[in-house]
Image (cartoon, grey):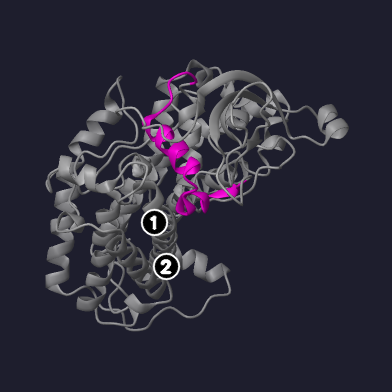
Amino acid sequence: MDWIAAPDAWLSRLVLQRGLALVYLLAFLSAAREFRPLAGERGLTPAPVLLRALSFRQAPSLFHLRYSDRLLAAVAWLGAALAAAVALGAADAVPLWASMPLWAVLWVLYLSVVNIGGTWYAFGWESLLLEAGFLAIFLGNDSIAPPTVGLYLMIWLVFRVELGAGLIKWRGDPCWRKLTCLYYHHETQPMPGPLSWFFHHLPRPLHRVESAANHVAQLIAPFGLFLPQPAATWAALVVIVTQLWLVASGNFAWLNWLTMILAVAAVDGALAARHLPLPDPPADQPDAPTWFAALLLAAAALVAFLSRRPVANLLSSAQEMNRPYNGFHLANTYGAFGSVTRHRYEVVLEGTNAPSPDGAARWREYEFHGKPGDVRRLPRQFAPFHLRLDWLMWFAALSPYAPSPWLHALVQRLLAGDRTILRLLRVNPFPDHPPTHIRARLYSYRFTTWRELRTTGAWWHRTPEGDHLPPRSLPHPPPAA
């Protein structure tokens, strides 16, 4: 690549920008669907409470001016409409000076949502989307040749994502060094997919191969992203294939898809264009104007300055994972599964219409879209869409006998028949009127064997472990957080 402009990288930029816009679209649609019941004015963890506790400097957000559920919905739907327009080419159809604000507005709108979402938005892929979205402001559009510095900023981001994930594994759970973590991971991961049962039942030698291949993809291949072509393309393909494997084996929202999109920045677009049936590249792409180059170099200098902390974290034996170092979510640290759980617990919500929750009560289960419940239901594929309530239910089960404050609030909403919460569930066993009592039961889950599947038709086997939360009824105020 030329240091200033890479005219042959038009395809890489096209895929990167359109793909990023599609991820933005999913993120805004998710906010429109979930934010009000989870973090709205009457949500499980209300955003107005968080806004009163945080300054603008701690959590930059437009909602510091004023918050309401209607304003949040307006921001979410505006962001979704703008993201859809950019995915269809709107940013390439306008002049460069107008294209940059389109990306900047997307970033500001989503930053405003994430910074008031609390625990529901405390995921590494939220920060990853925001960091990538900020860098996309400086990739230009079809009116100029793709700026090499902008592409390398994207490569630097995916390098930190992959190396951070690799190092946290190598330094963390010993099973990664012993190549045995995948004996458990496919079964105990947060939200299994439709193929996870089959991945779990691969022969153990193949699980060891999976683990070793993961170390190669995350500890070695990232350095190849900075090599001359075609080595950088091959390194990017290793990253992409590894991420596709993760897509097939589980549900990790848009993390894997966005990582693949970012890796495209290192792909030789001209080489790909010669081997794929694609339209001709845009004609007459001059170098960037001086004002754009100045802004790009300023952004690069900012990223270089802010990268001190994530680089120090990568080099530290006490490495952290998935932490933003500033309220703008720029130059974050990333990582995944520094430890792997060996045993799967699930919190199952059950309700009854009985006047008393005694031994004669008949309990019926609430079913979620993504998290395991009905043992005969094959896990579904939801990624790249993010089911935040389902994910938090997995985290709740990691503390089997210490219910989260938001879970108390969830039970109270279900007892009240809150329709906004019920829309986030797959099955409401009390469609006519709310139950009199609800409890949270703890179950031990494991994948069935091949023989058990043939005999019972069940994908899971579960064993009751007791109450996670004893029976509750209205009125019963939740405990203080």
Q: Is residue 355 magenta?
A: no
In primary-sequence order, the first of circles 2 and 1 is: 2
Q: Position of residue 380 (x, y in %)?
A: 64, 47
Q: Quadrant of residue 221?
A: top left
Residue 18's disc number: 2
Vertical arrangement, residue 274 with respect to residue 187, above or below: below
Which is more toward the observer, 428 or 340?
428
Q: Position of residue 419 (x, y in %)?
A: 48, 53
Using the rendered image of the protein, determine whether residue 341 is visible from the camera's viewpoint.
no
Select label 2 or label 1 by which is in front: 1
Tell me which amino acid carries mark 2: Arg
- Tell me the SS state at disc 2: helix
Q: Quadrant of residue 50?
A: top left
Name the residue at 27% across, 61% down.
109
Name the residue at 86% across, 34% down.
454
Q: Name the outermost residue toward the right.
A: 455
Vertical arrangement, residue 456 with respect to residue 21, above or below: above
- The answer to the question of whether label 2 and label 1 lie on touching residues, with beta carbons closer than 8 A, is no
Q: Position of residue 195 (x, y in %)?
A: 68, 42
Disc 2/disc 1 C-alpha distance (Å): 20 Å
Residues in magenta, as a range: 400-428
Vertical arrangement, residue 49 with respect to residue 480, above or below: below
Residue 345 shown left or right of residue 458 in the figure: left
Tell me the quarter of the image containing the N terminus: bottom left
Q: Name the outermost residue toward the front.
A: 355
Residue 31's disc number: 1
Using the rendered image of the protein, determine whether residue 214 is visible from the camera's viewpoint.
yes
Q: Position of residue 76 (x, y in %)?
A: 35, 63
